[in-house]
Image: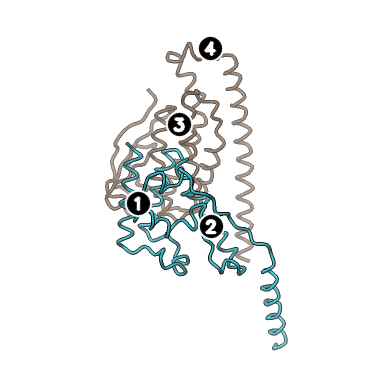
Chain colours: A brown, B cyan
Amino acid sequence: MKKSNSILTLALVAGLSFSLLACGNSKSTDHNDDNTEHDHSGIDHAAEHKMPDGSVVETSENKSISQLIDQYLVIKNALVQDDSRAAASAGQKLAETSSSIDLNTFEASKQSEIKEILEVVKEHGEHIAKSEIAHQREHFEGMTKDFMDILAITGTDRTLYQQYCPMYNKNKGGYWLSDSQEIKNPLFGSKMLTCGSVKETISMK
Amino acid sequence: MKKWLKLSLWIVLIVLVGIQFVPVQRDEIEPVTNADFIEHYESPIVIGNIIRASCYDCHSNQSKYPWYSNVQPIGWLLQNHISEGKSELNLSEFGNLSNRMKRMKINSIISQIADDKMPLPSYVLMHSDAKLDSLKKAHLVSYFDSILVDIDR
């Protein structure tokens, strides 16, 4: 009885997430269409306005990246609450999002690095999706650097705080990103919820 | 009751014999290329030997299959481990990865070794030369750490 129940919920959750994904996809393809049109109209345009008009390019890039950040933050919050299952499902979504991002929406010169970052983020997401919590935390901490790097390239529409706890990983220390200044440690969760400090504030110029 | 037991034993036996005739799928041994981890980093011979003995059966294109891989369902289980192992980390193709990916993989290697997750206990049981004692572990971990530094440079 119990088993069939859990199978039912699994099926339900799967169905739900599929339908959500389907929505997400159709939206993102819309965006891509917009962007490709954009490209056609303005190959020279982009070159001319590269610096002064940068903000326009960045807002269109941000859409897919902010989806990634959202999923990163969902994982972070799940780890803060020691909720391995929530982290796993967000990890799955993160992996899916990072492989569905259209590289052509980024400037050509940035594409190869963004591609490498997304490949790594995808693997981190896959591991978070199938691991126990200590391993999830390792991968979460590992991909924080990759998120920092992609944000440095694409910029972001929000303010994020890079936070640091020196005790993580046998006192080697560990970083994470948060959308709030208040420290809630995802690397230790309830064991050491308030260990850490803000190291850097990341925001769009 | 006895009859029932006898019958089920026969069924198990027939199935066990039957599955021996299912064709075996194996990964062919491929020649070592420049992308091979040990070649790529020109690892010291001692280190290279440890890595080959402890990792290469499931994480390279040079898997050596033991005789019992011909016995099913053990062979399937092994093949499963090898396929999974290679999709996670194939040291034969390590040199082709981006630096970022290399860094990630090496971090995972280090934590898997340090936490005694790898090599798999079941593998070590059958391959005593693959066992990493604390000295070998320390050796490997500091070697992989040095590779990390190398990549970041």
Report the disc number at residue A188: 1
* Labels 3, 4: one chain: yes
Q: Amino acid at mark 1?
A: Phe
Whole-angstrom CA distance, mark 3 to mark 1, is 31 Å
Mark 3 neighbour class, 10 Å CA radius: few under 14, some 14 to 19, many 20 or more? some
The front one of B33 and B89 is: B33
Query: Marks 3 and 2: in contact by CB < 8 Å?
Result: no
Q: Which residue in the protein does label 4 denote?
A: A44
Report the disc number at residue B82: 2
Q: Quadrant of the C terminus of chain B?
A: top left
Report the disc number at residue A161: none
Q: Is residue A128 visible?
A: no
Whole-angstrom CA distance, mark 1 to mark 2, is 33 Å
Q: Amino acid at mark 2?
A: Ile
Q: Which chain does the numbered disc 3 sit on?
A: A
Q: Secondary structure at mark 3?
A: helix
The front one of B137 and B61 is: B61
Residue B110: percent from left, percent from top: 37, 52
Closer to us: mark 1 or mark 2? 2
Which mark is first along the chain, 4 or 3? Answer: 4
